[in-house]
Image (cartoon, grey):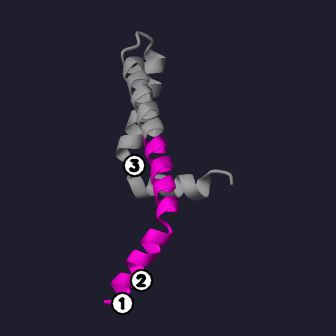
Amino acid sequence: MTGWLAFFQEVLEYGPQILAGLGNTLILAAIITFNGLVGGVLVFYLTLSPKLVLRRLVDGYISFFIGTPLIVLLFLMYYGLPQ
């Protein structure tokens, strides 16, 4: 039982920091959700473009992200982008 007691004591001790981090996480999630929605709508409208070259570029973009497993994208972002 001392393990649980120590756990709850630490939660109470670091509670304000946990709540501040939770607030920051929720704000970041809202910003990312909004940006993703706007980006998705933009990509959708670009697929309806009358210009064939633009449609092909957007179709290639969509095919790349649909056809690539998430773990590969995460590795590309982590190791492939400049630090």
Contact check, label 1 and label 3, Cβ < 8 Å: no
Point out residue 17 in the picture as x, y percentages from the top left corner. 52, 60
Say few, some or many: other residues with alpha carbon within 10 Å of mark 3 (under 14 / 14 to 19 / 20 or more): few
Residue 68 disc label: 3
State the CA–CA distance, disc 3 to disc 2: 44 Å
For the point 36% across and 15% down, the residue is 48
Say few, some or many: other residues with alpha carbon within 10 Å of mark 1 (under 14 / 14 to 19 / 20 or more): few
The residue identified by callout 2 is 6
Contact check, label 3 and label 2, Cβ < 8 Å: no
Q: Which amino acid does label 3 sit on?
A: Thr
The residue identified by callout 1 is 2
State the CA–CA distance, disc 1 to disc 3: 47 Å
Contact check, label 2 and label 1, Cβ < 8 Å: yes
Point out residue 34 in the picture as x, y percentages from the top left corner. 43, 31
Residue lying at the far right in this picture: please name it.
83
Mark closer to the chain start, 1 or 3? 1
Magenta span covers which residues? 1-29
For the point 46% across and 75% down, the residue is 10
For the point 41% across and 13% down, the residue is 49
For the point 44% across and 70% down, the residue is 12
Mark closer to the chain start, 3 or 2? 2
Q: Which amino acid does label 1 sit on?
A: Thr
Q: Does the magenta stretch include residue 19?
A: yes
Given this view, does label 1 or label 3 mark the residue nearer the observer? 1
Q: Is the magenta stretch mostly helix, strand or loop?
A: helix
The secondary structure type at the circle numbered 2 is helix
Task: Decide which of 20, 60 is in the foreground and name it.
Answer: 20
Quadrant of residue 51 within the rendered picture: top left
The secondary structure type at the circle numbered 3 is loop
